[in-house]
Every structure is written in structure tokens, then in C-alpha cells.
């Protein structure tokens, strides 16, 4: 029986590199302050490319890596919290840019967990028998929803896109995926949309909406605590449910949010932090794009060999979380 495998990966980041010293010129911060607290040294920032532009370029690279054509795709799922516009979906815009006119397209919103959510959705739809090849993309231009005067958030995030192509094959492929949501702390990480506006609003609502900040806002302590615990729990549960041990896993590919989160999670799991693949020093937190960018980087470096078992694990606004166990 054929399983669903990842047959190609791709990524794209804007060419502009903004390092910590560059940021210290526009906000009260320093390289030492950012590096010691996050592990981030650089990030990529768009100079005009929108989310669909980044996603389309990552998709084209994934198609080349998989050695298939855009017309072969019958499903495109895009995870993003920074779409080009409310409608049409970013997935439809990417479909047009790459010429994948045979695909069904839609977006999902699961913040930094979005790519893992996309993997699960695509896998289930494909197992239903209607779809043969799916393109799952995480794409973000977070620079347009950042408060560039808030040093607690603007130093963390970057722009980028990553993509993976799923198809049926003879290997074991995607073995198991776990998803979850915990909305009790939803206010810990937010980005509001357009203000509520109509002729029937009450005065107190009008005042509240006018004072709304339509940028990313975060309670760092809440997110840190949640992330460390959920990474450990997610990995332990997916291993228990599949009968594998952490020693069977070659790499854990985590959401690239904060070096200290990953170090604490590794310590709680009792494993060497070297098992966690990290590139956040170069790209910062690219939300739903971080896991597929890292996965593509590993693939291009030749770090993933046939039969290797890896775990993708992510957490984000919602609060959402998810992990996927994959045999390469």
C-alpha cells in the first residue's frame, strides 16, 4: 500500500538582510540584548514582495526539487497570518502566479503551527482519494504587521516562505500527525484586523475600535512557558502513539521562535539540543514559514537520507500546536 511522502521541498526569503545592529538604529536595542535572549542574529525583510510573491517562489523551487510541473498539482494549501488581502486567498494568488490551474486552493490560519496543520489537512484529503499531489506552503510577510517601535516584538520576526510537495509513494512517508489548540491563553499572541465599522456602532465600541493596535502583540512569558511544555508533551505523545523512541529520531525540526525555548525543551526531554535543527539565527521567527524553510535547508544540505525519521513540531497563536512524525 502506498503512503503519502514529501517528494520535494522549496523555500524563498527576501534578499535584504537586517542584522541586530541595523535594528539598533531604529529601536532601543542591541545585538547583545537580542542575541542573548533569543539567539537571533539576522532576519530577512521584504522590500516590496508580498506574501503570495514569496510563496510562489518557494513553490517553484519545490516543484523543481520534486521534478514535477505546476499542472500536476491538484491541491494547494497556504498557511499564513499575513495574507496579501482578505480575498481572494493567498493560495489562489499563488495558483495564478505558478500556473497550477488544476488545483483546489485555500488558506488556513493557525499561526506558527500552520505548516504542520497543512500537512495533516493535505494528508487527510489525499487519503480520501480525490487528490494525488498537494502543495503545502507556509508564507509570511510579517514586517507589514509589526510595530517597529516595539523592541519586544520587532526584533523577533522575519519574512520568508517554505513549501513541500506531497504525493503517494512506496515508502512510509508521513507516519502520524498530532494537532491541538488551547484557547485559554489566546490573548498572549494576537494581531487584530480591520476595526469594526458600521452606522450602528455604540459610542463605547467606536472609542475602543479607534484605539485598537493592528500589529502583533505578545506576552513573551506566557508563550515561553507554553512552548517549552508543549514541545515536550507533543513529542512524547507522538512517540508513544507510534511505538518509537527519541533515539529513533534523527532530527527534530522545531518552529524557529527562540533558542532558549528549544534549549529548555531539549533539557526537559533529556536529549542533546543538537538533535534539534535550528536556523533561527539567520532568519528569526518567520511564523508558519519557519518549519518548511528549515526542512528545505536540511534537504538542500543533504542532511536527510532515505529512511531517516524526523519530527516537525510547532506552536503559535491561538494557542495552537502540532507535530508530525515523518520517515524520509
Image (spheres, helix red, strand yellow):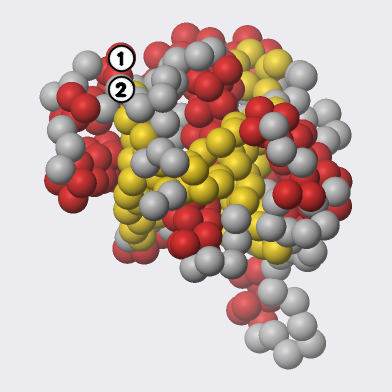
Vertically, is 88 above or below 262? below
- Residue 221 location, quadrant: top left
Q: For the C terminus, which image quadrant?
A: top left
| 288, 41: nearer the viewer | 288
- Residue 264 location, quadrant: top left
| 181, 222: nearer the viewer | 181
| Badge 2: residue crowd in 10 Å (few <14, some 14–19, many ≥20) | some
Which x, y percent locates residue 94? 78, 49
C-alpha separation, residue under disc 1 versus residue under disc 2: 10 Å
- Residue 270 location, quadrant: top left
The image's mark for residue 223 is: none
Q: On the rendered structure, is 328 left or right of 140?
A: left
| 46, 75: nearer the viewer | 75
Q: Which residue is mark 2?
A: 250
Question: Tag 1, which secondary structure?
Answer: helix
Which x, y percent locates residue 188? 41, 52
Vertically, is 67 above or below 274? below
Q: On the rendered structure, is 107 left or right of 271?
A: right
Closer mark to the observer between disc 1 and disc 2: 2
Residue at the image point whose x is 69% and y is 57% from the top: 74
Residue at the image point whose x is 50% and y is 14% from the top: 302
Question: Tag 2, which secondary structure?
Answer: loop
Q: CB under 8 Å between callouts 1 and 2? A: no
**Camera sees residue 114:** no
Which x, y percent locates residue 255? 44, 35
- The number of numbered discs placed on residues in the rendered structure image is 2
| Badge 1: residue crowd in 10 Å (few <14, some 14–19, many ≥20) | few
Mark 1 or mark 2, earlier in chain: 2
The image's mark for residue 274 is: 1
Which x, y percent locates residue 138? 60, 43
Amino acid at each position: 500500500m502506498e503512503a503519502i511522502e514529501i517528494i520535494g521541498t522549496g523555500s524563498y526569503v527576501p534578499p535584504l538582510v537586517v542584522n541586530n545592529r541595523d535594528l539598533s538604529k531604529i529601536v532601543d536595542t542591541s545585538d547583545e540584548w537580542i542575541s542573548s535572549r533569543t539567539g537571533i542574529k539576522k532576519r530577512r525583510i521584504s522590500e516590496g514582495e508580498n506574501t503570495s510573491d514569496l510563496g510562489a517562489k518557494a513553490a517553484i523551487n519545490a516543484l523543481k526539487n520534486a521534478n514535477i510541473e505546476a499542472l500536476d498539482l491538484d491541491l494547494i494549501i497556504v498557511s499564513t497570518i499575513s495574507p496579501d488581502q482578505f480575498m481572494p486567498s493567498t493560495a489562489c494568488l499563488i495558483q495564478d502566479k505558478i500556473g497550477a490551474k488544476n488545483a483546489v486552493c485555500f488558506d488556513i490560519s493557525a499561526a506558527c503551527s500552520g505548516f504542520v496543520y497543512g500537512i495533516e489537512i493535505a494528508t487527510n484529503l489525499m487519503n480520501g482519494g480525490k487528490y494525488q499531489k498537494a502543495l503545502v506552503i507556509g508564507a509570511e510577510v510579517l514586517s507589514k504587521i509589526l510595530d517597529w517601535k516595539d523592541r519586544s516584538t520587532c526584533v523577533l520576526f522575519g519574512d520568508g516562505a517554505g513549501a513541500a510537495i506531497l504525493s503517494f509513494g512506496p515508502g512510509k512517508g508521513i507516519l502520524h500527525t498530532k494537532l491541538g489548540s488551547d484557547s485559554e491563553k489566546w490573548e498572549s499572541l494576537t494581531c487584530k484586523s480591520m476595526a469594526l465599522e458600521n452606522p450602528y456602532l455604540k459610542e463605547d465600541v467606536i472609542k475602543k475600535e479607534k484605539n485598537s493596535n493592528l500589529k502583533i502583540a505578545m506576552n513573551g512569558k506566557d508563550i515561553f512557558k507554553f512552548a517549552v511544555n508543549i514541545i515536550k508533551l507533543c513529542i512524547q505523545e507522538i512517540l508513544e502513539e507510534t511505538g518509537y523512541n527519541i533515539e529513533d529520531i534523527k532530527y527534530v525540526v522545531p518552529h524557529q521562535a527562540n533558542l532558549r525555548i528549544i534549549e529548555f525543551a531539549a533539557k526537559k526531554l533529556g536529549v542533546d539540543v543538537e538533535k534539534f535543527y535550528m536556523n533561527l539565527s539567520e532568519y528569526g521567527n518567520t511564523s508558519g514559514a519557519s518549519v518548511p524553510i528549515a526542512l528545505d535547508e536540511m534537504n538542500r544540505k543533504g542532511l536527510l537520507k532515505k529512511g531517516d525519521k524526523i519530527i516537525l513540531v510547532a506552536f503559535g497563536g491561538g494557542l495552537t500546536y502540532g507535530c508530525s512524525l515523518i520517515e524520509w
